[in-house]
Image (cartoon, coloured by chain):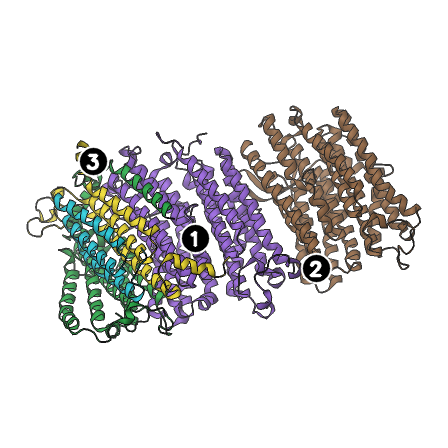
């Protein structure tokens, strides 16, 4: 495989980090400040797109900061198909979220907006760092950076609720990453003889026994708690105290996807799916993920707060991805990778809608949304498309990834897990469709909505329309994503 | 008796040094009065000096000063110095340092105890501690 | 070195050290400590460590005792133990 | 606390006694320390290498001269530290708890004063002798310095600290103590500036009218003088501060 | 200066102190410039020495020009300095930290001890001289003398503080004297069996005369270890440290906390490696029920856990940091005793990184105390808004303590945990991770307090009323405090990113030693 050494990954990662300086410097002038956010966003996307052709050609883009940060392990970026896909999703959605955030933050009269945009940019850099990381150590570095950079965002309101949420957030994320990932990582380093580079075959392949593998896998899966695998999931609903753009981008796209991204890396790059197939240990992870899928869907059913329901839905969807990759089958892994993108588009739409409803009508609870489709038809249509995508119904991208996941299950021959998918799809439908139904078809009670209520500001509505359209488009044109995914699974499409 | 002759008598100095050291150390830790602690500290330090000086003692040897007239050094073409006739000088040198260090520590500690007396009006550790308990603490 | 003298001195040392620590009058304790220092100075001389003996006489029996007495004068004379 | 102390003491004592059986007998000639190469070298070669008969002085001021320099610094540190901790700049002895010293008679005793006045000159001359003759007999900078310091302490005891401070004021004490170390380390520094290692006295023969061996002997006298300076000043300073609670007024 | 560089490291602070005695008493304004000049010279000499060491591998300086007997192959009759990369690193840390703290002290010393500024700076310089001398010397007894210098100066530097400080300093005198005397006694036990005082000679004689089984040598090792442990406040011998550091003046705490314990750990390593030899330190002793190395690692695990738990229960920032130091001491002692190269490397690297972490945190707390007048956690409401730069530096220090990349704290933990896994000491690994988590809890509790405004935090019991010290009216942090703080914070990241270079330096010094695989 050809390797290109280029600083473009670095620039792509730095674009948002450097934007922090003008964002803070021009904090007094909101319009100027936001223009920097946008320029950084477009710069980032351009840089990412520059690398896209190379990656599609099967080349790998590399950049090394420090040759050896510890013996044998460099601090290095390496862009491959998986990283490219994730980066593409994250940087595209960042631009949309920025636009949305402007509408939301101004519409909801939030304070400390400079801090908000600054840390938002930092979070994006950390996300790209994880996506580009060439080895476990580099990935861990950016993973921790992301945990910390998002803390001020989660606790943005600085009230008592935010404090509790922030506490839970950091407690879960830090204690798992320090308590589980760090020792597992050092153990890997020691076992592999000082090598931590992600490679197709896995750097740990043939170097550990089944019991060690299982323990390490468990440490990694629970340790990357951003993936929300039960029982380390409850930070996510608590993090919903954040302003909605944060929930949308970070807790539907960046942060949680970083968690599952790391787990995919562990399966494909650290152990290698081929090596894991020789042992019968990954199925434990599959069942843990399956359990999470069902239970979180059930919990989601009982939630009345819209954002919390979305959060539990996210937990379930993330476990789809973990489940898919732990199947170790080609289809399963492909499905997982695709689901990162598909779910991102769908879920971010839903969060955007939740935020738009809050900005326009100040409603947080599902029971208050009866008939809201009549006053906010655009928003609720987008919501409908988003939920279709999450459930996995045509004509949305969610169907494609779910199709691959189901195929993967069959390929791996785990019929029990197939049932998990089916049951959970029904549950997904059960917690989303009634909202849409009531919003459009039921008549609102008297005085539920004040007369002035209409659609949210344009800056809010436009992004959510775009993302919902993207969900649909991904159904028709999934080619590029499949190409990228096939670079990892090694199967031509 | 054999035990006595082999272990006690030839090493009497070492036994006594251990005893003195234990006396001093116990006073340092367990005594209540600060000045008493310091007396203990001084005894503790002299015990160590006793140990070192005992190392340098030689049976039948004299003080470690060469004689001017009777024993000129080799440089003047005289007889070579008989090592067995002079005590080992090195422990003496080391202990000069230790004595000075001891008095320096003692002086500083006494100064501190005066300052403590100035602040608390007593030199008894338990009285001072009970006064501290009344102060705002962490 | 004179073993018999050595042993007698050592026994006296232990005795004076115990007394210095037992006496409740700190002034007396300081004085006994002076005696202790003097005995140990004799001991050094007996062990042919004349330089050490000289220093101990000046520092231990002299200055140490004096500053200890000075401190006792400037603080309290009675001790609880 | 007492039980803990007893345990710690008993543990240490047992540990030490355990090793005692392993020691060479007291006064043994061929123990590693007494018969070893290091001690033998000092005794045998001291005349050849330094021309100083008092082996202790030679080892102290030359072979292990660096130790002794820092030993002097220890004394200096003690002096400064006591001033830093105890010295009372200005506000007198207001509000202090009562002390024994307050009950002392105002006027110093005649007999004490006269005896001290008689003894002090003799003491000082003897101290200088001890310092100067340290190469050949027991003594040297420390002993001489302590005795010189003791003579000032005697003055303070007999006539009050203020009387002694008139001769050796606080400012002078500090200068004297620092000068002592400066003499010591300066001697070393001159060696360094003449192109040899720090404290390598033999190179001083270039500026002293002697051969390299005698240069060592002379340099030892310099450094011993430096030690005496510091020790004199600090010993008196310690007493003056402790006897007056740092006020340097009144006294015992 | 070239060949004379090692001696200048120690002499520069000494002459600085003398200069203050001559001129500083009268002209108080000269004290700080003299201090800074002396410490800068010392730093320059350290850098020069270190460069020579890197080129040659080892730098020997003979004091008084006394060459070893038998044409340089025999025993040493004088005192010699010997610098290798490990001691060179520690020297660099000492020089750099002391210089930074000296800059930082510009306003603090005048505020804390207005009438004894010259004395303070003299003691300060002599403490640095003592610490540097301890690190550089190769003579066991010379080390004792310098140990006493650094002890006496630190007693005094602590005792110039409040009245509680004097009492803590007195306890420190008692404990410190016991520790130093144990060390002296241990050297005596070595001397009685070997007859030499130079560290390498002692080792050579132990090997040549096959003294390893001798009870005296075994007791000597125990005594020296106990002495050094008392001095470094290794749990359960730590009781003197928290009060001494937290009641002392700000500058004293900021100077001593990073340096004194670390230098003592360096000395422990020095004793293990140079005097006794690894083979002796780590081998199972016949007749001992416990493997010696296992025992110490267990003790350090306990120290780590105990230190972290005690830190958690403190409501005062300075006190809390002192207990964290106790936990960190456990890290290093345990790392050094893991009996493999990685552990030793990690311990030495942690000496460097922990010195700067502690420095950064103490400096930040000093700024907080200077500006708010107190250091209780309850009083930190809204500090992120009031003093964002200081709190940012504090955050970097805290993240390093927790052990998050890319700060150096992460990498030292990386090596130590790796070594623990390699040695199979799982309780040590567990203790390290536990302490990381504890540190995370401790520091995020503070961040929370400082990040959220007062009304949100009111649920916490407030012993301190922030309104009594209205922050807005306080002057801005003087640059003499902010600059060292930021330099130390940035150093944490630089040390982290370039940790491999440092580790290679350490490894080059450890190469000559024969590390053998740890016994299960």
- Report which colour depicts chain C: cyan
Q: Secondary structure at mark 3?
A: helix
Q: Are marks 3 and 1 in contact (CB under 8 Å)?
A: no
Q: Chain of mark 1?
A: E
> Which quadrant of the view contains residue E23?
bottom left
For disc 1, the marked residue is: E241
Q: Secondary structure at mark 1?
A: helix
Q: Chain of mark 2?
A: A
Q: Which mark is residue A231?
A: none
Q: Are marks 2 and 3 in contact (CB under 8 Å)?
A: no
Dot in front, 2 or 3: 3
Whole-angstrom CA distance, mark 1 to mark 2, is 43 Å
For disc 3, the marked residue is: B7
Count residues near mark 2 (Cα–Cα under 10 Å), then give few for <14, some for 14-19, many for 20+.
Answer: many
Count residues near mark 1 (Cα–Cα under 10 Å), then give few for <14, some for 14-19, many for 20+.
Answer: many
Name the residue nearer the viewer: D246 or B130: B130
Q: Give me the chain that's purple.
A: E
């Amino acid at each position: 495989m050809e390797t290109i050494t280029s600083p473009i990954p670095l620039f792509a990662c730095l674009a948002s980090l450097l934007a922090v300086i003008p964002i803070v410097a021009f904090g007094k002038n909101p319009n100027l400040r936001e223009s920097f956010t946008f320029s950084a966003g477009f710069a980032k996307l351009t840089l990412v797109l520059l690398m896209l052709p190379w990656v599609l050609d099967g080349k790998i883009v590399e950049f090394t900061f420090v040759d050896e940060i510890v013996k044998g392990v460099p601090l290095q970026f390496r862009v491959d198909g998986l990283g490219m896909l994730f980066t593409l999703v994250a940087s595209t959605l960042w631009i949309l979220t920025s636009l949305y955030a402007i509408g939301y933050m101004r519409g909801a009269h939030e304070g400390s907006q400079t801090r908000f945009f600054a840390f938002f940019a930092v979070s994006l850099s950390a996300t790209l760092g994880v996506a580009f990381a060439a080895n476990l150590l580099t990935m861990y570095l950016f993973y921790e950076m992301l945990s910390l950079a998002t803390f001020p965002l989660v606790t943005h309101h600085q009230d008592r609720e935010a404090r509790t949420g922030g506490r839970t957030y950091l407690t879960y994320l830090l204690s798992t990453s320090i308590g589980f990932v760090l020792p597992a990582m050092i153990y890997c380093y020691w076992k592999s003889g000082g090598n931590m580079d992600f490679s197709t075959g896995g750097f740990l392949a043939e170097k550990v026994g089944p019991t060690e593998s299982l323990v390490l896998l468990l440490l990694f899966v629970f340790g990357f708690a951003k993936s929300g695998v039960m029982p380390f999931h409850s930070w996510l609903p608590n993090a919903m105290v954040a302003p909605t753009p944060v929930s949308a981008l970070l807790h539907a796209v960046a942060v949680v996807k970083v968690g599952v991204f790391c787990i995919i890396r562990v399966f494909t790059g650290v152990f290698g799916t081929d090596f894991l197939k020789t042992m019968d240990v990954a199925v434990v992870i599959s069942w843990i993920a399956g359990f999470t899928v069902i239970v979180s869907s059930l919990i989601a059913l009982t939630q009345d707060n819209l954002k919390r329901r979305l959060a539990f839905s996210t937990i379930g969807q993330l476990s789809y991805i973990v489940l898919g990759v732990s199947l170790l089958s080609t289809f399963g892994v492909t499905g997982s990778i695709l689901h990162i993108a598909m779910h991102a588009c769908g879920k971010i739409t839903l969060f955007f809608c939740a935020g738009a409803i809050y900005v326009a009508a100040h409603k947080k609870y599902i029971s208050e949304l009866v008939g809201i489709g009549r006053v906010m038809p655009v928003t609720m249509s987008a919501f409908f498309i988003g939920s279709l995508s999450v459930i996995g119904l045509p004509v949305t991208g969610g169907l494609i990834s779910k199709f691959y996941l189901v195929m993967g299950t069959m390929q791996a021959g785990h019929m029990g897990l197939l049932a998990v998918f089916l049951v959970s799809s029904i549950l997904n439908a059960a917690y989303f469709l009634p909202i849409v139904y009531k919003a459009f078809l039921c008549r609102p009670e008297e005085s539920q909505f004040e007369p002035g209520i209409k659609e949210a500001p344009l800056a809010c509505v436009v992004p959510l329309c775009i993302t919902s359209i993207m969900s649909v488009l991904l159904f028709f044109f999934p080619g590029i994503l499949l190409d990228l995914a096939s670079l990892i699974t090694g199967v031509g499409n | 008796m054999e035990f006595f002759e082999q272990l006690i008598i030839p090493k009497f100095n070492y036994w006594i040094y251990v005893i003195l050291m234990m006396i001093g150390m116990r006073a340092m830790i367990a005594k209540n009065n600060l000045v008493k602690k310091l007396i203990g500290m001084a005894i503790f330090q002299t015990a160590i000096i006793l140990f070192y000086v005992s190392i340098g003692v030689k049976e039948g040897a004299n003080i470690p000063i060469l004689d001017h007239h009777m024993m000129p050094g080799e440089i003047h073409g005289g007889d070579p110095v008989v090592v067995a006739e002079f005590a080992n000088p090195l422990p003496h040198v080391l202990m000069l340092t230790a004595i000075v260090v001891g008095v320096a520590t003692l002086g500083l500690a006494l100064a501190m105890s005066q300052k403590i007396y100035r602040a608390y009006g007593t030199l008894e550790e338990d009285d001072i501690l009970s006064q501290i308990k009344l102060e705002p603490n962490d | 070195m004179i073993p018999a003298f050595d042993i007698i001195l050592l026994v006296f040392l232990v005795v004076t050290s115990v007394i210095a620590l037992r006496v409740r009058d700190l002034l007396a304790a300081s004085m006994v400590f002076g005696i202790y220092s003097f005995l140990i100075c004799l001991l050094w001389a007996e062990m042919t460590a004349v330089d050490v003996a000289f220093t101990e006489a000046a520092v231990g029996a002299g200055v140490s005792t004096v500053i200890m007495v000075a401190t006792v004068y400037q603080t309290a004379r009675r001790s609880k133990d | 606390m007492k039980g803990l102390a007893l345990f710690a003491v008993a543990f240490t004592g047992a540990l030490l006694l355990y090793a005692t059986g392993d020691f060479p007998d007291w006064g043994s000639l061929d123990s590693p320390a007494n018969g070893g190469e290091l001690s033998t070298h000092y005794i045998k070669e001291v005349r050849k290498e330094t021309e100083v008969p008092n082996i202790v002085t030679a080892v102290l001021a030359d072979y292990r001269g660096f130790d002794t320099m820092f030993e002097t610094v220890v004394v200096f540190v003690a002096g400064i530290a006591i001033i830093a901790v105890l010295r009372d700049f200005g506000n007198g002895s207001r509000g202090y708890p009562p002390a024994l010293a307050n009950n002392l008679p105002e006027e110093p005793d005649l007999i004490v004063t006269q005896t001290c006045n008689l003894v002090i000159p003799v003491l000082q001359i003897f101290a200088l002798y001890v310092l100067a003759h340290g190469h050949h007999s027991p003594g040297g900078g420390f002993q001489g310095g302590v005795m010189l310091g003791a003579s000032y302490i005697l003055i303070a005891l007999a006539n009050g600290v203020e009387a002694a401070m008139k001769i050796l004021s606080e400012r002078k004490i500090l200068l004297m103590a620092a000068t002592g170390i400066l003499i010591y380390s300066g001697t070393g520094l001159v060696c360094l500036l003449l192109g040899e290692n720090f404290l390598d006295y033999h190179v001083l023969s270039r500026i002293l009218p002697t051969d390299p061996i005698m240069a060592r002997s002379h340099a030892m006298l310099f450094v011993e003088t430096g030690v005496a300076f510091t020790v004199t000043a600090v010993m008196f300073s310690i007493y003056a501060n402790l006897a007056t609670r740092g006020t340097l007024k009144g006294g015992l | 200066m070239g060949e004379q560089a090692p001696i200048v490291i120690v002499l520069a602070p000494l002459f600085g102190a003398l200069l203050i005695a001559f001129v500083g008493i009268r002209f108080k304004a000269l004290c700080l410039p003299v201090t800074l000049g002396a410490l800068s010279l010392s730093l320059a000499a350290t850098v020069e020495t270190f460069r020579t060491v890197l080129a040659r591998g080892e730098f020997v300086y003979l004091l008084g020009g006394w060459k070893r007997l038998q044409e340089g192959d025999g025993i040493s009759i004088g005192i010699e300095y010997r610098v290798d990369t490990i001691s060179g690193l520690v020297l660099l840390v000492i020089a750099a930290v002391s210089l930074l703290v000296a800059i930082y002290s510009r306003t603090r010393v005048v505020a804390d001890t207005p009438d004894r500024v010259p004395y303070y700076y003299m003691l300060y310089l002599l403490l640095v001289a003592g610490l540097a001398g301890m690190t550089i010397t190769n003579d066991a007894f010379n080390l004792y003398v310098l140990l006493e210098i650094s002890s006496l100066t630190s007693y005094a530097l602590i005792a110039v503080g409040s009245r509680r400080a004097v009492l803590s300093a007195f306890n420190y005198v008692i404990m410190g004297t016991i520790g130093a005397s144990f060390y002296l006694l241990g050297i005596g036990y070595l001397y009685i069996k070997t007859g030499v005082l130079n560290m390498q000679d002692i080792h050579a004689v132990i090997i040549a005369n096959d003294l390893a089984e001798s009870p005296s040598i075994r007791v000597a090792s125990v005594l020296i270890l106990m002495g050094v442990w008392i001095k470094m406040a290794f749990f359960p011998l730590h009781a003197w440290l928290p009060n001494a550091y937290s009641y002392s003046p700000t500058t004293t705490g900021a100077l001593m906390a990073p340096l004194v314990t670390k230098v003592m750990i360096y000395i422990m390593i020095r004793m293990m490696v140079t005097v006794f030899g690894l083979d002796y330190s780590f081998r199972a002793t016949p007749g001992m029920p416990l493997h010696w190395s296992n025992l110490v690692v267990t003790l350090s695990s306990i120290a780590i856990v105990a230190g972290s738990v005690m830190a958690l229960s403190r409501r005062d920032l300075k006190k809390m940091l002192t207990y964290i130091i106790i936990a960190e001491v456990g890290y290093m002692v345990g790392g050094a005793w893991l009996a493999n190269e990685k552990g030793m490397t990690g311990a030495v690297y942690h000496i460097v990184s922990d010195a700067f972490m502690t420095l950064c945190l103490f400096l930040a707390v000093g700024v907080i105390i200077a500006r708010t007048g107190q250091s209780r956690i309850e009083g930190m409401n809204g500090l992120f808004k009031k003093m964002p730069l200081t709190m940012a530096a504090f955050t970097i220090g805290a993240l390093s303590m927790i052990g998050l990349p890319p700060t150096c704290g992460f990498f030292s933990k990386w090596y130590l945990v790796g070594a623990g896994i390699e040695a199979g000491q799982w309780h040590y690994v567990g203790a390290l991770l536990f302490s990381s988590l504890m540190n995370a809890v401790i520091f995020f509790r503070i961040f929370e307090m400082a990040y959220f405004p007062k009304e949100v935090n009111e649920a916490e019991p407030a012993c301190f009323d922030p309104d009594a010290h209205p922050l807005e009216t306080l002057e801005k942090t003087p640059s003499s405090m902010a600059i060292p703080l930021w330099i130390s914070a940035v150093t944490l990241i630089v040390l982290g990113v370039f940790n491999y270079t440092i580790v290679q330096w350490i490894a080059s010094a450890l190469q000559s030693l024969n590390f053998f695989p740890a016994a299960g």
